[in-house]
Image: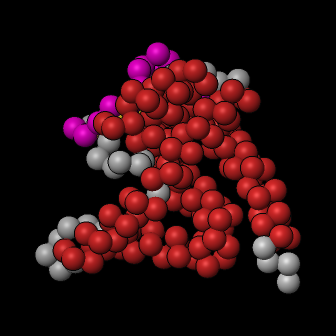
Amino acid sequence: CPQISSAVIESMAENLIDFKLSPILFYMFFGVSGAIAFRAINTLDGMVGFKDDEHIHLGWFSANLDTVVNYVPARFTAILIVLASAIIGENYRYAWAIAKRDHAKTPSRNHGWPMAAMAGALRVQLEKPGHYILGEPTEPLTPDKILSALRIRNTAVMLCVLLALPVIILTRLFFFPY
């Protein structure tokens, strides 16, 4: 079913920020405490980041704080998806074009970037009916596209680790030698 495949790929791209790349980036720049702080902010947003009567003030704050701390990682994630697409032979030019064009179509200021980049890389249309449509249906959205999205995601994570590792090692050697 195309809608199930779309939901899986959207979730994979969105969670690439929250559960993979942002924690790595926060660890890279702020150490263990930065990674823990990021996860706490993200978890709080997931728990109470909705505007209901019971959590209006805490929910508003945690949702907006999560948006702020994910601003750079979300865009960096889209770039990594484009690079990963180039490495594994997917359509990296289209990934970037769709990311630039469609990133603002989702309610989230951040999650649209990797979702649109993934739609472009796979040459498919990702859709949450009644909410947004990302990409163009150049190719059919089949379960095989989920496997391609997994390859892109795994390659993007490896690129992030390869970029972060030298920074982490050098920072620890020069600024925190003990």
Taking 139 as reference, is 145 above or below it?
Answer: below
Residue 109 image position (x, y, % from top left): 35, 48
In this view of the protein, can residue 125 be seen by the observer? Answer: no
Question: Magenta part mainly helix, strand or loop?
Answer: loop
Taking 175 as reference, is 99 above or below it?
Answer: above
163 magenta-colored: no
In the picture as drawn, the residue positioned furthest to the front comes out as: 174
Relative side of 148 to 56, left or right = right
In the picture as drawn, the residue positioned furthest to the left comes out as: 53
Residue 75 image position (x, y, % from top left): 51, 44
Q: Residue at x 27, y 78 (%)?
A: 58
Q: Quadrant of the N terminus?
A: top left
Residue 18 image position (x, y, % from top left): 51, 59
Relative side of 79 to 28, left or right = left
Q: Quadrant of the C terminus?
A: bottom right
Front residue (pair 54, 93): 93
Taking 140 as reference, is 144 above or below it?
Answer: below
In the picture as drawn, the residue positioned furthest to the top comes out as: 138
Residue 167 image position (x, y, % from top left): 77, 58
Taking 90 as reference, is 74 above or below it?
Answer: below
In this view of the protein, can residue 78 be seen by the observer? Answer: yes
Q: Residue at x 20, y 67 (%)?
A: 51
Q: Which residues are magenta?
A: 130-144
Q: Residue at x 43, y 29 (%)?
A: 100
133 magenta-colored: yes
Q: Residue at x 34, y 49 (%)?
A: 108
